[in-house]
Image (cartoon, rainbow, N blue to C red):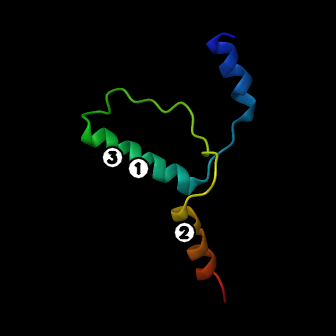
């Protein structure tokens, strides 16, 4: 399958990411570019959630958020 067919086939599956997640990714790219003289032509083509089990840091952060919202 050609690259154009692959891109058009996945076009209907796009969703708008959470604004906070988008802000963090934008900040990370800006920091990378500022340290690497323009980023060397970096291009973000796709942002997707990583599959797999949650890490200990992820679970600890999640628990902290849940605990902070308890009354």
Name the front one of labels 2 and 1. 2
Give the farthest residue toward the bottom. Answer: 71
Q: Earlier in the sequence, mark 2 or mark 3?
A: 3
**Quadrant where the N terminus is found in the figure:** top right
Mark 2 and mark 1: span between their CA atoms?
A: 20 Å
Q: Residue at x 49, y 52 (%)?
A: 23
Mark 1 surroundings within 10 Å by alpha-carbon count, few (fewer than 14), some (14 through 19), many (20 or more): few
Query: What residue would you read off at disc 1?
Result: 27
Q: Secondary structure at mark 2?
A: helix
What x and y, as percent, mark residue 48? Answer: 61, 41
Gap in angstroms between the C-alphas marked 2 and 3: 24 Å
Mark 3 highlights which residue? 31
Q: Nearer the viewer, mark 2 or mark 3?
A: 2
Residue contact at pointers 2 and 3, CB within 8 angstroms: no
Drawn side of residue 14 relative to residue 43, left or right: right
From the viewer's side, name the closer residue of 39 and 1.
1
Q: Residue at x 54, y 64 (%)?
A: 56
Secondary structure, mark 1, is helix
In the rendered image, the vertical position of residue 30 relative to residue 57, given as above or below: above
Q: Residue at x 69, y 36 (%)?
A: 14
Counting from the top left corner in percent of width and height, residue 7 is at: 66, 21
Q: Badge 3 local density, few (<14 within 10 Å), some, or many (20+)?
A: few
Q: Which residue is mark 2?
A: 61
Q: Disc 1 to disc 3, how far (Cα)?
A: 6 Å
**Could you tell me which residue is drawn at 32 percent across and 38 percent down?**
33
Displayed quadrant of residue 54? bottom right
Total marks placed: 3
Is disc 1 in contact with disc 3, using a CB cutoff of under 8 Å?
Answer: yes
Q: Which mark is residue 57?
A: none
Q: Secondary structure at mark 3?
A: helix
**Residue 30 horizontal/vertical position (percent):** 36, 44
Q: Residues within 10 Å of mark 2 (few under 14, many from 20)?
A: few
């Amino acid at each position: 399958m050609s690259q154009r067919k692959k891109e058009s086939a996945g076009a209907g599956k796009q969703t708008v990411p959470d604004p906070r997640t988008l802000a963090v990714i934008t900040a990370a790219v800006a920091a990378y570019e500022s340290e690497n003289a323009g980023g060397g032509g970096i291009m973000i083509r796709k942002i997707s959630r990583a599959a797999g089990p949650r890490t200990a840091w992820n679970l600890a952060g999640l628990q902290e958020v849940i605990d902070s919202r308890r009354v």
